[in-house]
Image: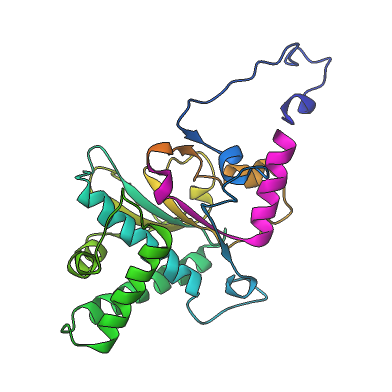
Amino acid sequence: PQGPLLISILDILSPDFVKILYPGSKYTGGKYFFNRNKDSNYTNIRNISKNEIYSKNNQITRIPQSLEDALMFFYLTVIIGVNKGEHPTTHNRTMMIHPSQLTEVHKIYLRWVKMIRNRWLDELAENDSDIDKNRLIDKFHFIYTEELNSSDYILTKNEIKNKISLVIKSTPIILANSTEKNILDWRENYSRILVGGMILDRGFTVEGLNVTYMPRSIGVGNADTIQQRCRFFGYKKDYIDLCRIFLPRLSTRAYIEYVNHEE
């Protein structure tokens, strides 16, 4: 909406009309996720508390609980997709972790995600009587019952126990930033976890993105900048119940205000 103000009305490029382009019926954008008047009360948004945001002034050393919850939710959606017979030639499940524009911070989150994955795989490899294994499966089942328990996505605790290890092992964790030359072949894997910064900010389509973990501040809050970070907008109506966006409260408020302004 700010576009026409950027060009002098005396310039030959200045428009003399406005044509509103509307997306298709399956598009989910700012209005869907952040409309203040929406009855569903931001059902796809989850909060990242202030003390779980890594920054220069808050160099946290413990893995954020919200990151573990986001990973659990994502792996469960992968099981659901596999159960539905989805295949990488036609579908993808992707989680995006976008903590900062700084590559050093990306490495921290990449290490954390790999630590979580390795710990979970070690616990799941124990025998069925192991306390840690059962506690972990109970946590996965709790996330399922809280977030995904519907007639469309039926998962038993036993099914989670039997499939979760394979799903974790078959989901690559990929660093996607300016220091890496990773070429993503979306048909190679059904599921993946991307950790990165600016490359995930602008002009980059993340196929099958359904979980976004973005514990970064809005900075100076330029409207176009915070909008460009919204890789989670797109044609997602067919799997919108499997989509979650983890944001700090200030970022959520900024998007709500932007959508209000846009409307």
By secondary structure, the bulk of the magenta-drawn segment is best described as helix
Residue 252 falls within the magenta-colored stretch: yes
Residue 188 is left or right of residue 53, and the answer is left
Closer to us: 52 or 151: 151
The percent coordinates of residue 105 (x first, y second) are 52, 68
Residue 175 is left or right of residue 80, and the answer is right
The percent coordinates of residue 156 (x first, y second) are 24, 64
- Tell me the quarter of the picture where residue 110 sits: bottom left
Image quadrant where one finds the C terminus:
top right
Residue 204 falls within the magenta-colored stretch: no
The percent coordinates of residue 134 (x first, y second) are 26, 81
The percent coordinates of residue 203 (x first, y second) are 50, 38
The vertical placement of 263 against 178, above or below, is above
Closer to us: 159 or 165: 159
Image quadrant where one finds the N terminus:
top right
The answer to whether residue 28 shows anywhere in this view is yes
- Taking the spot 36% from the left edge, 44% from the top edge, the residue there is 208
Q: Which residues are magenta?
A: 239-263
Closer to us: 42 or 193: 42
The answer to whether residue 173 shows anywhere in this view is no
- Taking the spot 72% from the left edge, 46% from the top edge, the residue there is 257
- Taking the spot 44% from the left edge, 64% from the top edge, the residue there is 70
